[in-house]
Image (cartoon, rainbow, N blue to C red):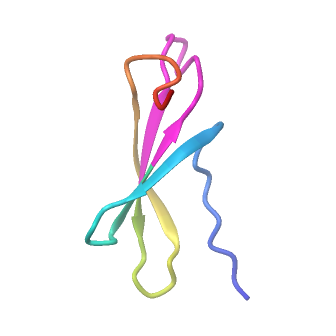
Amino acid sequence: MESNAADAGSNPSFLAIRPDRQTLYAVNEVNEMAGKATGSLRAFTIDPDSGGLTPINERASEGGRPAT
């Protein structure tokens, strides 16, 4: 069986899939991103055939530990 693993970032604590099942979002419970005191969010496209994930973007959450 093929693995569809993707790097969701450090300490992913919350995952959400859009209702159209084309995008996955990951919230990363970190205290720092790019030298700033903030958590992060990552987005991935979901391949409809394989379920594989492709990174789209990463953004700062503008605050540390965003899902707590």
Work out whether 42 lies above or below 17: above
Q: Is residue 51 left or right of residue 3?
A: left
Give the quarter of the figure containing the N terminus: bottom right
Q: How many numbered dots are placed on residues in this image?
A: 0
For the stretch drawn in magenta, the main secondary structure is: loop
Residue at 41% across, 55% down? 16
Q: Percent position (x, y) of residue 4? A: 62, 72
Which of the two residues, 50 or 19, is positioned nearer the viewer here? Answer: 19
Q: Is 33 included in the stretch rendered in magenta?
A: yes
31 lies left or right of 15: right
Residue 40: horizontal and vertical position, in percent? 47, 31
Vertical placement of residue 30 versus 21, above or below? above
Residue 60 vs 55, above or below: the answer is above
Magenta residues, as a range? 26-43
The single residue placed furthest to the right in the displayed view is 1
Residue 42, image x, y percentages: 45, 44
Give x and y (percent) for residue 25.
Answer: 41, 51
Magenta span contains residue 34 = yes
**Residue drawn at point x = 51 percent, y = 11 percent:** 37
**Which residue is most to the left?**
20
- Residue at 58% across, 41% down: 13
Q: For the point 69% across and 76% down, which residue is it?
A: 3
